[in-house]
Amino acid sequence: MKPHYRPEITRASRPLTFDVEAINERGEMVPTAIAGENPLTLYVDKREIVTLMTLGQAPEALAIGYLRNQRLVQSIDEIAAVQVDWDTDSVVVTTRKATSGEARARAKGMTDRMKKRTVTTGCGQGTVFGDLMEEIDKVKLRDDVRLSEEALYALMDQVRHHETIYKNAGAVHGCALATNEPDASRILSFVEDVGRHNAVDAIAGQMWLENVDGSDKIFYTTGRLTSEMVIKAAQMSIPFLVSRSGLTQMGHAIAQRIGITMIGRATGKHYLLFTGKQRFIKSISPTLVA
């Protein structure tokens, strides 16, 4: 079996929280943890792509996942190296050597996609290059996998007990990739960032780096389920999307169109199943209202 390819990457995580002084309601000076926020300009083969505002937890995975979810690269095999330099607030992605014709085609494809830039509702103004709905009808999610109510509750309980930057400093969103077992769920990756679109991109990058198949996994986010979040989950082949927050009309419409199983307002023992109910097994209560 051919070994999984990994590009050369740095490991340049930034400090995630900083201590500052604040005055509380009693007039007392108290040391307080706040979340970090750093500009990170992404370059691909010396071409400037975008500047991301990020916590800096997983900058290399963020860069790879951003390129993946914006469809600016087609596979991890195209990437030779990812180098983060916080002295210049930059991340440089170098693609693997290609023939002159392939290089020209890649550069033209990237230019064409960057001409179509949609500002989304992501925190800090997320972007989607290319037509927002381009290729969405080509997405085929597995319909032979199921999510049980027990597994959903197990995931929600794990997230609740997960040690997070949010608990310490607030001001961040979290995303998790989790297993989906008959009556259990295990968090494989948990990333927090100042914008939820950054957190989902970082997980997308980690999935490519670790060769993780998303076709039977659960994706959890603390943020709202917008069109961008639904599209990114689908592009990672993930059939189950769960949020403790609500959703937008376009997010709902695209979820229906793709057939993703989308659950919102998931806290404690409460949830709302919006789309894809054919994959959900409600086993704690005997009936599921149609």
Image (cartoon, rainbow, N blue to C red):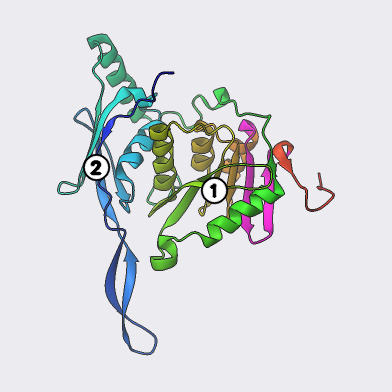
Residue pictured at 51% horizontal, 24% vertical: 135
Q: Which residue is mark 2?
A: 41
Question: Residue 81 is drawn in which quadrant?
Answer: top left
Indicate whether residue 1 is drawn in magenta: no
Q: Is residue 197 left or right of residue 252?
A: left
Indicate whether residue 276 is drawn in magenta: yes
Identified by mark 1, the residue type is: Tyr
Q: Which residue is mark 1?
A: 220
User: Residue 106: x, y in percent?
Assistant: 30, 19
Separation of marks 2 and 1 at Cα, in angstroms: 27 Å
User: Residue 162: x, y in percent?
Assistant: 49, 59
Task: Assign a secondary structure to mark 1.
Answer: strand
Q: Is residue 142 left or right of residue 187?
A: right
Residue furthest bottom as drawn: 26
Q: Is residue 148 left or right of residue 172?
A: right
Q: Nearer the viewer, residue 2 or 231?
A: 2
Residue pictured at 33% horizontal, 51% vertical: 57
Q: Comparing marks 2 and 1, which lies closer to the viewer?
A: 1
